[in-house]
Structures are given as C-alpha cells and as structure tokens.
C-alpha cells in the first residue's frame, strides 16, 4: 500500500493568514492526489483533485500543487469557515488517506 | 444535483454481519463515468477506504479488511450496498458512501454518513 503522511498535524492560524499543508506519498503517485475538508459531524468535501484542479464551487483561495511524492494545499487568506480538518488522498492505486491536518483558531 | 443517503442498523452485535445500503438520487448509478464507494471513519480518527464498485458489478476492496467486505449494486433501485462480516468493536465507525469520478479518481459526492456501533 502507498502510505500518506501530512504535516503539520495541526496548525493554529488567524483569519486572513496564508496556510500551507504538506502531503507526502511513500512512492510516486504522479498527480493522482485529492484534498478534502471535513468539519465536525459532516462528511468530507472535495476541494482539489488531480493535485491542482479546483473542484467546482470551491473558492479560489484554495489551491493545490505538486506531483510525484510531494504535494501542497494552500489557503491564501484563511476565512472563518475554513477552520476544519484537511485530508489528502492518493488515487494512484487502492485509495489511501493521510492522517489529517487540523486548522484551528489562533 | 446528485445525493447519496446511507441506511441500515446503527447497532450490530460482535461476530454478526453489518449491512448498509446507499441510495443514489439525482443521477444514474449506471453511468459509465463513475464508480461508487464506501469509506469509514472510526470516532475521532481518520478515513479508511473500504471498497468500490462499478455499475457492471466489478469491485475492488481494501486488503486490510481481509475479505470480510462485500459490495453489491442494484441498478433497478439505483442503490449499492455494503456487507462486513464477523464484525468486532474495531469496526465501529461512521460509514460513508461516495461517488468516485473516473477522471480525477477522487470522491466528489458523499452521503451524510451513518454511525454503526458494534456492541453486545
């Protein structure tokens, strides 16, 4: 199986901050990577697919980059509704998810 | 707009079989563009993919479930189902059904989730 790691595991930030989350795959996955946002008690929501493609309806302050083994999710200006847990997921082989990064209020 | 809705018992006894269904509305489960999957999340933990099915019945599963999971599709009802046999407390989780696109291979629509507790 391809293992996914994320860093940091949590980050405290303020509204308006730029936030960057990193995801690393244990082997190359080309651009087969997705990012999800999950709020407490809710299902995950797809933000980014194919490493850098913005899902329809997702605000443009979210962006993704990377290929191979190293990927990044960036929130350019954190908004109150962005406080949540973020997961990466590789789609190169049987799907596996990263452990999550919790973004909370500083 | 596609909607998915899980249904089934919220409490299952150890060693028994967990059975859930996912009803799809607003789109056809027989579309060649999508796969349909199950993902679970133990309380306070991360996400684990269980398996995926195509409308033709072709399936793939997470080996970690050691062949305990079975996913089936009923195109006449526009729904797909999950069975997990020989459950233990470790199978306690919120179970989500979701749609996976063939393009980005990501899960773009999710059900609200259903908590299944394994306990006697």
Image (cartoon, coloured by chain):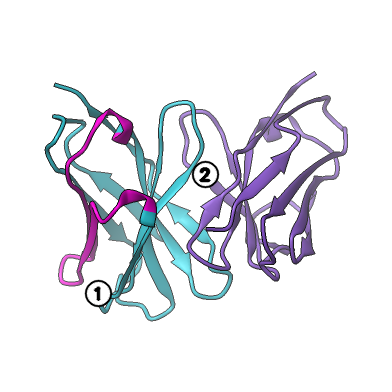
The chain to which mark 2 is attached is A
**Residue drawn at the location 52% of the way across and 58% of the way down:** A1
As displayed, is residue B65 above or below residue B103?
above
Percent x, y for residue A34?
A: 63, 58
Residue highlighted by disc 1: B57
Residue highlighted by disc 2: A44
Between A60 and A74, which is closer to the camera in this rendering?
Answer: A74
Which quadrant of the structure image shows residue B8? top left
* Rendering colour (chain B): cyan
**Residue drawn at the location 16% of the way across and 30% of the way down:** B14
The chain to which mark 1 is attached is B
Left or right: where A41 falls relative to B10: right
Note whether residue B4 is visible.
yes
Between B109 and B11, which is closer to the camera in this rendering?
Answer: B11
**Residue drawn at the location 83% of the way across and 25% of the way down:** A14
Q: Secondary structure at mark 2?
A: loop
Is the residue under label 1 in contact with that under label 2 (CB below 8 Å)?
A: no
């Amino acid at each position: 199986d391809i293992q996914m790691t994320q860093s940091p595991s949590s980050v405290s930030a303020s509204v308006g901050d730029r936030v960057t989350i990193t995801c690393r795959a244990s082997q190359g996955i080309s651009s087969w990577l997705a990012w999800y946002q999950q709020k407490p008690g809710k299902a995950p929501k797809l933000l980014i697919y194919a490493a850098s493609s913005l899902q329809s309806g997702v605000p443009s302050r979210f962006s993704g980059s990377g290929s191979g083994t190293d990927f990044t999710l960036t929130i350019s200006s954190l908004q109150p509704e962005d406080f949540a847990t973020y997961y990466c997921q590789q789609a190169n082989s049987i799907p596996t998810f990263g452990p999550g990064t919790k973004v909370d209020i500083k | 707009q596609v909607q998915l809705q899980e249904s089934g018992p919220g409490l299952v006894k150890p060693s028994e079989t967990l059975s859930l269904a996912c009803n799809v509305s607003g789109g056809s489960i027989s579309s060649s563009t999508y796969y349909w999957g199950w993902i679970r999340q133990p309380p306070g933990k991360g996400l684990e993919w269980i398996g995926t099915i195509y409308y033709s019945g072709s399936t793939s599963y997470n080996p970690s479930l050691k062949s305990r999971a079975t996913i089936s599709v009923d195109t006449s009802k526009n729904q797909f189902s999950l069975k997990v046999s020989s459950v233990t407390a470790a199978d306690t989780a919120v179970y989500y059904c979701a749609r996976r696109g063939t393009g980005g291979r990501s899960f773009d629509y999710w059900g609200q989730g259903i908590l299944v507790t394994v306990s006697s």
